[in-house]
Image (cartoon, grey):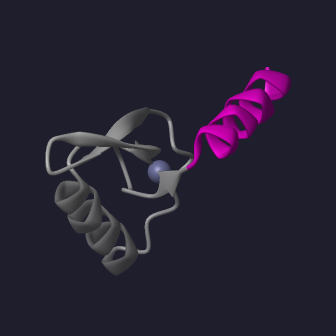
Amino acid sequence: MQFDKAMKLKRDAKARNLKCTHPELDKEYYLGSSTGDWVCTTCGESFSEQERDELFEAKAKKK
Ligand SMILES: [Zn+2]
């Protein structure tokens, strides 16, 4: 996902006071190159590789 799209999602999510569980993350791109971070396709929140792993681990434990 492009950085500017993520920023827009983030603004919208904040405006709607969206409670997001970050069901799907996409690689974040800025000007065509990967930033190395991940971004939630629902709310635009960005995560480092480590934060992404922790998020997925936490979800796995809930099952
Ligand atoms: Zn999210």
Q: Residue at x 21, y 66 (%)?
A: 8
| Quadrant housing residue 58 | top right
**Rendered position, 47 above or below 56:** below
Q: Residue at x 46, y 45 (%)?
A: 37
Where residue 50 appears, x then y in whole percent? Answer: 69, 40
Q: Residue at x 81, y 28 (%)?
A: 62
Q: Residue furthest right?
A: 61
Horizontal arrangement in the rendering, residue 31 relative to residue 47 (left or right)? left
Horizontal arrangement in the rendering, residue 14 relative to residue 54 (left or right)? left
Q: Magenta segment, principal secondary structure? A: helix
Horizontal arrangement in the rendering, residue 3 relative to residue 31 (left or right)? right
Where residue 20 appears, x then y in whole percent? Answer: 51, 54
| Quadrant housing residue 17 | bottom left
Quadrant of image for the C terminus: top right
| Residue 37 magenta-highlighted | no
Q: Nearer the viewer, residue 11 or 33?
A: 33
Q: Nearer the viewer, residue 49 or 54?
A: 49
Where residue 38 appears, x then y in whole percent? Answer: 45, 42
Q: Nearer the viewer, residue 49 or 55?
A: 49
Q: Residue furthest left?
A: 31
| Quadrant housing residue 49 | top right
**Rendered position, 17 above or below 26:** below
Q: Which residues are magenta?
A: 48-63
**Rendered position, 56 above or below 50:** above
Quadrant of image for the N terminus: top left
| Residue 54 magenta-highlighted | yes
